[in-house]
């Protein structure tokens, strides 16, 4: 567990900045958070941690509803990405948006349990689960808890996921955006997603092709813990 807990520096490299303040233990979102569905109803949502199709294999703490909640500025920036891609007949599907600290804590508890490996084959066949934090696939203080980070992929004009070479949350070197393992078409698809996101101010990380943080996120020094549910969006 020491290995899991002593990950501040690597987590920072992975895109999660050490918090200036402790996570805020409120049940309500601050003013300025929105449901993406209200801002961009055309963006598909498959919120994996609200169900059991994820690397833990069960619903994650804090995901009371399968909703993408984001800081409003970040949600609006995502609508610009959506608009740009639509010109090429492409769309977006989000897998995770705002993530409460209690969900991150659930990931930490799972990582500490060597017996819980039911989802290994689908999600982390080559990387031991006690290395997932150290290697930058998970973070103790995640950018997702600030409301300006999103996990997503491209869909085609019939709503089919574009082949990126690996699936969402496949924790493996093959999911590094620059990995040579995917074929040329898959690498082009990753680059299409990366360039579309970068054009509207979203920065990727080195370990996961699906993970991007909004450069202009409005809460860069805060980490929240309110649950993922529409009722939380009633302001501070
Ligand atoms: C767990 C995965 N979807 C992810 O978002 N990983 C990064 C490193 C994070 O937890 O912030
Ligand atoms: Zn992510």
Image (spheres, rainbow, N blue to C red):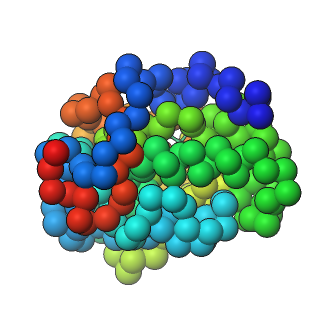
Depth check: give the residue in front, 29 or 127: 29
Quarter of the image with the C terminus is top left
Q: Is residue 112 visible?
A: yes
Q: Is residue 129 above or below residue 93?
A: above
- Measured as percent of width and height from the top left, residue 202 is found at 33, 38
Q: Is residue 179 visible?
A: no
Q: In the figure, is residue 47 to the left or right of 82?
A: right
Q: Residue at x 76, y 44 (%)?
A: 112
Q: Quadrant of residue 186?
A: bottom right
Q: Is residue 197 above or below residue 222?
A: below
Q: In the figure, is residue 84 to the left or right of 92?
A: left
- Measured as percent of width and height from the top left, residue 198 is found at 33, 38
Q: Residue at x 66, y 67 (%)?
A: 57
Depth check: give the residue in front, 136 or 162: 136
Quarter of the image with the N terminus is top right
Depth check: give the residue in front, 175 or 114: 114
Q: Residue at x 31, y 64 (%)?
A: 229
Q: Quadrant of residue 137?
A: top right
Q: In the figure, is residue 128 to the left or right of 168?
A: right
Q: Residue at x 38, y 46 (%)?
A: 225
Q: Is residue 3 above or below residue 200?
A: above
- Measured as percent of width and height from the top left, residue 18 is found at 47, 22
The image shows a total of numbered marks equal to 0
- Measured as percent of width and height from the top left, residue 10 is found at 62, 24
Q: Is residue 123 above or below residue 64?
A: above
């Amino acid at each position: 567990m020491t290995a899991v807990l002593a990950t501040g520096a690597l987590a920072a490299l992975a895109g999660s900045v050490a918090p200036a303040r402790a996570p805020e233990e409120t049940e309500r979102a601050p003013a300025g958070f929105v449901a993406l569905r209200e801002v961009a109803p055309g963006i598909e949502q498959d919120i994996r941690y609200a169900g059991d199709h994820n690397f833990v294999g069960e619903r994650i703490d804090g995901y009371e509803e399968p909703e993408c909640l984001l800081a409003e500025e970040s949600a609006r920036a995502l609508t610009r990405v959506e608009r740009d891609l639509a010109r090429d007949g492409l769309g977006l599907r989000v897998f995770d948006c705002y993530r409460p600290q209690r969900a991150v804590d659930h990931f930490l508890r799972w990582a500490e349990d060597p017996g819980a490996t039911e989802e290994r084959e689908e999600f982390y066949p080559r990387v031991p689960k006690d290395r997932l934090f150290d290697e930058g696939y998970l973070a103790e203080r995640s950018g997702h808890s600030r409301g300006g980070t999103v996990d997503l992929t491209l869909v085609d004009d019939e709503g089919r996921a574009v082949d990126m070479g690996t699936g969402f949350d496949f924790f493996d070197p093959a999911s590094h955006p620059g990995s040579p393992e995917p074929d040329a078409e898959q690498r082009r698809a990753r680059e299409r997603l990366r360039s579309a996101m970068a054009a509207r101010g979203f920065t990727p990380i080195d370990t996961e092709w699906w993970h991007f943080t909004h450069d202009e996120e409005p809460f860069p020094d805060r980490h929240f813990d309110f649950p993922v549910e529409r009722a939380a969006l009633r302001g501070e």
